[in-house]
Image (tube, rainbow, N blue to C red):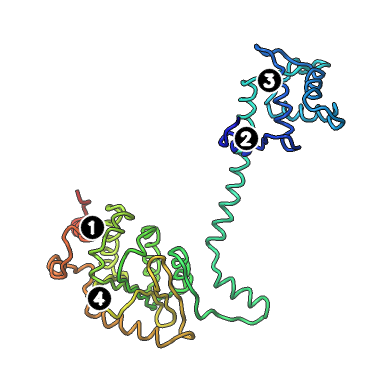
Amino acid sequence: MMDDKTKAALRSLGLVMGSNVDSRTLNLLGAVLRIQEDPPIPLSFNRIYESMMEENPGPSLTKAWVRRVLKTLVDASLIRVESEHAYRKKYLADVNTVMAGLEKIKSEALQKLNRQRSVLSQQLDFMTSMDCGSLAENLVEDLTGGKQELSSRFIKGMDEYYRVTNSTIYEPAKEGDIIRCSTMVFAPFVQGAMERVDRIFVVAARGVEVRYSVTIKALTDDSSIRSEIPPDRLVMTIASFIRSRKEGLPIDIRFNDGPKNTYQFMSLNNDSMAFMISENPLTAAWITRVFNPDLIDNAIAGFDLQWEKAVSLSKLSPEYLKKAKIPPNACVVEALADAYRITSDGKEPH
């Protein structure tokens, strides 16, 4: 009896075992194999047809039907034709022809799947990058002739969080604007962080001030950072922030003592804000002043109060870290030390 794995493999190649119409290819192949001698001797069409009639007699088994299926087997290389140009062709099948045929069918199936995968990959990328907020605004405007702007939206997952904050905060930001980012823990943001950090330098080059306020205790919970970010990448990223600050770009990362009544958010001026609701799974909300001006104003007021008392990344001394009880072997602390060395003498750390 054929095992399930073999049946599944044959089905994936479009070959079906059984007695119905879908299995006629394998039925005829089986009939040819059963009447083959050892070693194989080419068989005439009449011999094959007679064998099929012996096994499955009936009016539906015509010579025309057998010829069509036999041609399918030859085209698939499961059966080989001897004396191909002769008036009366002869056919041969054994384990070698079967293997050659299966290899051909597999190759063609893989080519088809790869073409489908390419199309599906493009569709997936398009769908993933789709911003339903902008899509909704455009659709409403097209249907009604009037423009309506979103005032709030729910966000699920880091990819969507990045897309929403990119389209509503980073891309619209212009010279003189302020982007505020309040971070209590790093865990929700570390996956893919190195690929996303460039947008900070891009907006700063346009004259947008970027303020990152980070809770100092975030440095102690570094398991997610160690698992997601290579140490050398972390060092070079921190060094880039320090250099940018020295070169006059309006970027600063400051560390605060982390009051209990704050939360994680990102805002553009006091116009809009995305704030974290839960970390795992990551859920957030994006709102504008139209939706809740008090929430935005209170968040920014608390942020600015912390900001004035916080310590800049470029001035984060060992004494301050020790006083804050940050372990000296925390990965961010180690990366800071190496980044300071790079930015002070221009040499790579050993």
In whole angstroms, how far apart are the C-alphas of marks 2 and 4? 62 Å
Quick check: 127 above or below 70? below
Pointer 2 residue: 10
Per the image, label 2 sits on a secondary structure element best described as: helix
Q: Residue 33, how many percent across, how many down? A: 69, 21
* Rendered image: mark on residue 331: 1
In whole angstroms, how far apart are the C-alphas of marks 2 and 1? 52 Å
Pointer 4 residue: 258
The residue type indicated by label 2 comes to Leu
The residue type indicated by label 4 comes to Gly
Query: Could you tell whether 35 is left or right of 179 in the image?
Result: right
The residue type indicated by label 1 comes to Cys
Pointer 3 residue: 93
In whole angstroms, how far apart are the C-alphas of marks 3 and 1? 65 Å
In whole angstroms, how far apart are the C-alphas of marks 4 and 3? 77 Å
Q: Residue 174, how many percent across, how many down? A: 43, 75
Query: Could you tell whether 343 is left or right of 270 in the image?
Result: left
Per the image, label 1 sits on a secondary structure element best described as: helix
Marks 2/1 in contact by CB < 8 Å: the verdict is no
